[in-house]
Image: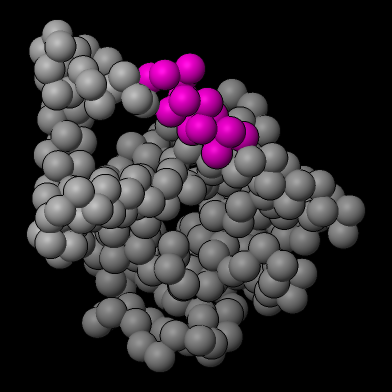
Amino acid sequence: MTILILGCGNMGGAMLTGWLAAGLDPARFTVVDPYLAEAPGGVSLLPAVPQGHFDAVLLGVKPQALDEAAPALAGAVGPDTVLLSILAGTEIASIRTRVPDAGAVVRVMPNLAAAIGKSPIGLYGEGLDPAGQAWVEALLAPLGQPEWLEREDQLDIVTALAGSGPAFVYRFIDALAAGGAELGLEAEQARRLALATVEGAALLAARSDASPAELARRVTSPGGTTAAGLAMLDADSALLRLVEATLRAARDRGAELAAAARGQS
């Protein structure tokens, strides 16, 4: 299996790190990225896309750079190539217009936790039979949890929830820490406690058979400190409405990017 990574920035780099950490042979990978000074040991870093078809091509350039980058793939993509795109808001139809020779096109929405094998991965593809879908799943499984979607437009939701979601969680960690500091803890100590709290809660939720709602109930004693805090978050569904509005804004932006890309096709 040979894999070309065209554009190895934050997300492409996280995926490469995850694959290598999982034991994939570095010699399988070729990276083309003019802004990358060096690649991990054993990974080929080239200034331009080489001739010869790859089994998989990971398209990791910025969406606005697709028109410029796509012609370079003409010699690297063939009918047996699976083109994996991590370009937010760029639909398969737009990609096929620019890279028509790929056998299959799969949109992939991971997040930076791919570097440690803990990323949710939304998938939607065209041109794959069941064996091809299984191959893509096996390729991406070392990076986290692949999830096939029924419709392409659902990727905008996955982008908001799983792609942008870590940023929202980091903001919540910062808010926990800032709240602790405001109430009298030393700022760095509050940060450590907030980070450890979220890490432990997430690990427990991932490993437990109980739902997050049930875990919250178990932490909460009637009339206790947790109940007092939850009363603030739950008042008028404040937290739910805030999160829904946050995801809606991110989803709608993804739809706007897709519409803009369609207009350029």
Start and end of the magenta stretch?
A: 234-248
Task: Name the outermost residue toward the top.
Answer: 222
Q: In which quarter of the image is the C terminus?
A: bottom right
> Quadrant of the rendered structure where residue 81 is?
bottom right
Residue 137 position in % (x across, y down): 39, 39
Q: Would residue 247 be found to the left or right of residue 12 on screen?
A: right
The answer to whether residue 117 is visible is no
The structure residue drawn at horizontal position 48% and vertical position 48%, both measured from the top left corner, is 164
Verify whether residue 246 appears in magenta: yes
Which of 90 and 231 lies nearest the eye of the viewer?
A: 231
Query: Where 246 falls versus 192 (above or below)?
Result: above
From where the camera sits, is residue 255 visible?
yes
45 lies above or below 177: below
Does the magenta run of residues contain 237? yes
Q: Indicate left or right for 35 with 98 as reference.
A: left
Q: Magenta: predominant secondary structure element?
A: helix
Quadrant in the picture for residue 212? top left
Please state the horizontal and vertical placement of residue 249, each as a whole percent of the image: 63, 41
**Residue at the spot 29% in from the left edge and 65% down from the top edge:** 17
Tell me the quarter of the picture where residue 22 sits.
Answer: bottom left
| Residue 15, image x, y percentages | 37, 60
- Indicate left or right for 74 with 214 as reference: right
